[in-house]
Image: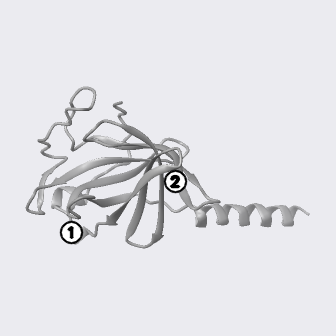
Amino acid sequence: MKKLFMFVAALALVTHVVNAAPLSGLYQTIDDKTNQPKSVVALYEYGDGGALAGRIVALYGPDGNISETIASPVKVADKIKGTPKFVGLDIIWEMEWDADDNRYEDGKIMDPTSGKVYSSVIWQDAPGTLNVRGKIGPIGRTQKWRTLSSSDMPSELKDIDTSKWTPNIRK
């Protein structure tokens, strides 16, 4: 009986680890209107429960190249409390992993240009693309974010250590 219990416990642990799809990493956001790269967001886990958050770490200029990074932020998010810089701003927080639905949910996402906060769901249908949905009730909008490879990143973004980050929520 003891061996059966240990087997079931081990199987449950392995299933939990396999089902947990850590989506931590760097993602390129795409402007809905121009279909051009807009920013780079670092998704990171924080807290004991492994909640997911997202922080803007770079912005693209009109020429399609990175114009500012977390090492040198410039543009101000004037619609956000305290007028922080866009780069360094947490725009996703409190996302919890739902192994049954294979997605992060029950968190918040902020539109950094308006300061509006929405409920959020994040999931992945295929490698390389992330679905990020902001919504009010059943109505919302889904963006496709692209996984960034290390060759696409400026050098100052390659070694970002998010292990001590916690979201700084500005509503």
Q: Check the image and name the residue furthest to the right.
A: 1
Sequence-wise, the earlier of marks 1 and 2 is: 2
Q: Give residue 25's quadrant in the image.
A: bottom left
Within-10-Å neighbours for mark 1: few <14, some 14–19, many 20+: few
Residue drawn 34% across the image and 49% down it: 162
Q: Name above or below for residue 79 compared with residue 52.
A: above
Q: Position of residue 73 (x, y in %)?
A: 14, 43
Tell me the crowding category of disc 2: few under 14, some 14 to 19, or many 20 or more residues within 10 angstroms, Cα based.
many
The span from disc 1 to disc 2 (Cα, nearest Å) is 26 Å
Farthest residue toward the top? 82
| Identity, as a three-letter code, of the amino acid under mark 2 | Tyr
Quadrant in which residue 152 is drawn = bottom left
- Report whether 168 appears left or right of 10: left
Q: Could you say which disc has been placed on residue 152 in the image?
A: 1
- Does residue 103 sit above or below 116 in this rendering? below
Q: Mark 2 points at which residue?
A: 104
Image quarter of residue 88: top left
Q: How many labels does the image show?
A: 2
Q: Give the residue displayed 39% in from the left and 38% down from the top.
A: 117
Relative to 168, residue 5 above or below: below
Q: Where the N terminus falls, by quadrant?
A: bottom right
- The three-letter code of the residue at mark 1 reads Asp
Q: Which of marks 1 and 2 is in front?
A: 2
Q: Residue at x 36, y 30 (%)?
A: 171
Q: Is mark 1 on a helix, strand or loop?
A: helix
The percent coordinates of residue 111 (x first, y second) are: 32, 43
Q: What element carries label 2?
A: strand
Q: In this view, does 13 lie to the left or right of 164?
A: right
* Residue 106 position (above or below residue 6): above
Q: Which residue is drawn at 13% across and 41% down?
A: 75
Q: Position of residue 165 (x, y in %)?
A: 36, 42
